[in-house]
Image (tube, grey):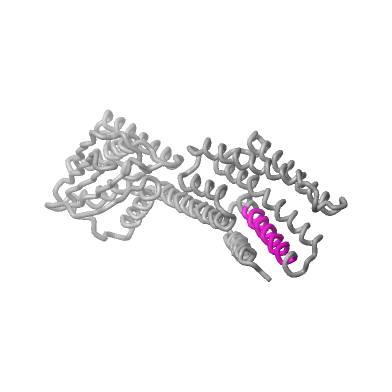
Amino acid sequence: MMDWTTYYYSVIDSTTLLIAVLGISVVLVLRDLENRWRWFCVVFFSDMVLKTSASLISRFSALYWHNIPLQTACDFLSALFSSTIIPLLTLYLLRCCSQEPHKSFLWKLILSLWGVSAAAAVGDLLQRTLLPGGTEQKRWLILVYLLCTAISLIVSLIAVIRRRKQLSKIQFILILVYLLAPVSIMLLAMELMLFIDQGKRYLKQKEELANQKASLAVLQMRPHFIYNTMTSIYYLIEQDAPKAQQVTLDFTDYLRKNFTAIAKEGTIPFAEELEHMRAYLAVEQVRFEGKLFVEFDTPYTSFRLPPLTLQPIVENAVKHGVDPDLDPLTIRIQTREVKNGVEITVADTGPGFGVKDNDEPHIALANIRERLEMMCKGTLTVSEREGGGTVVSIFVSQKHD
């Protein structure tokens, strides 16, 4: 007859088994997992399947089948698979901290303790099955097993606390849960870590895709801009040689900064982006002499943003705002500190940011908005300027990674 304690632990083991099987299924379904991470998860959840299966078989063997050798073997396997939990955690911890296991003293220590505990478990099994009256003898080897497991747990806790700054808050909390919670909760924590890791990879892929889009956009620089600039330089050489030299320098500087921005990953100082815009606008002001004016009000530049954030905005303003039949275009670029970040505004006195020849301006803005959100928790909004024109407002958080 099954008493309530046996029933309780049977339910816990059954639940744990189902969660572990679910974990294996999830790992096999997620096709874009890093190969080493996939195998780690498969080994971890398989270990839990074997551990809980052995525990269930041992419990039913004692209750219904009365098969002592089978019960003893299952108890041994359950203890052995349980002892691998901490080494697996150590591997995950080192992975999160970008450390190679074979170079880590922590890994060697944990592996040594696991080897001693596994040997003690094997010795205890042999003592119980081969020696006369083994089940009644003092099981000192099981004490060695428990001692090594306890030491491993303490070492792991110390290692996690010492490396907490290298872990995200959620990783730190989940690893502590992994170490200290019951097995079923630990498995849920592991699956949550799996989903978080997958989510990070997805966001990273989106960021890389956005950067690739930005790079392609720059590589496909408007041919007419290059053509018009070179034509302007050609005529200036005869009409105003010093000005032609200056435009050539500005254009060269613009091209250099453009291609440098393509090669960069992550955010860049706003000062670099501003220099890039100054070089571009200097060229355009020569082309549209008397029709394009620029005002800079940027007292605050100590922040970072994705490369090539301002370029599409300013280029669009020039492209659609400078017209011989219209009043001169004025572009004003400002920065100011706001709560938790910085606001950049690009305002122009042009005809407005409507749909022009195609969707290029809107695609460019969508790309900028996506990169701002992913790389610096920023936002971008477009509104009409009072008195005519467009205002593009960019918020950049100062708390991004």
Magenta stretch contains residue 121? no
Look at 27% across and 37% down and name the residue there: 282
Magenta stretch contains residue 46? yes
Between 95 and 362, which is closer to the camera in this rendering? Answer: 95
Q: Quadrant of the C terminus?
A: top left
Q: Residue furthest top?
A: 242
Asked if residue 221 lies left or right of residue 82, the reply is left
Between 138 and 225, which is closer to the camera in this rendering? Answer: 138
The answer to whether any part of residue 20 appears in the image is yes
Task: Locate residue 319, reporting x and y percent.
Answer: 26, 50
In the image, which residues are magenta? 41-61
The kind of secondary structure the magenta stretch mainly shows is helix
Task: Locate residue 194, reporting x and y percent.
Answer: 54, 54
Between 349 and 197, which is closer to the camera in this rendering? Answer: 197
Task: Locate residue 331, reporting x and y percent.
Answer: 21, 44
Asked if residue 330 lies left or right of residue 311, the reply is left
Look at 38% across and 49% down and name the residue there: 371
Task: Locate residue 37, reporting x and y percent.
Answer: 60, 51
Look at 73% across and 56% down and name the residue there: 75
Image height of 179 relative to 60, above or below: above
The answer to whether any part of residue 25 appears in the image is no
Image height of 362 relative to 301, above or below: below
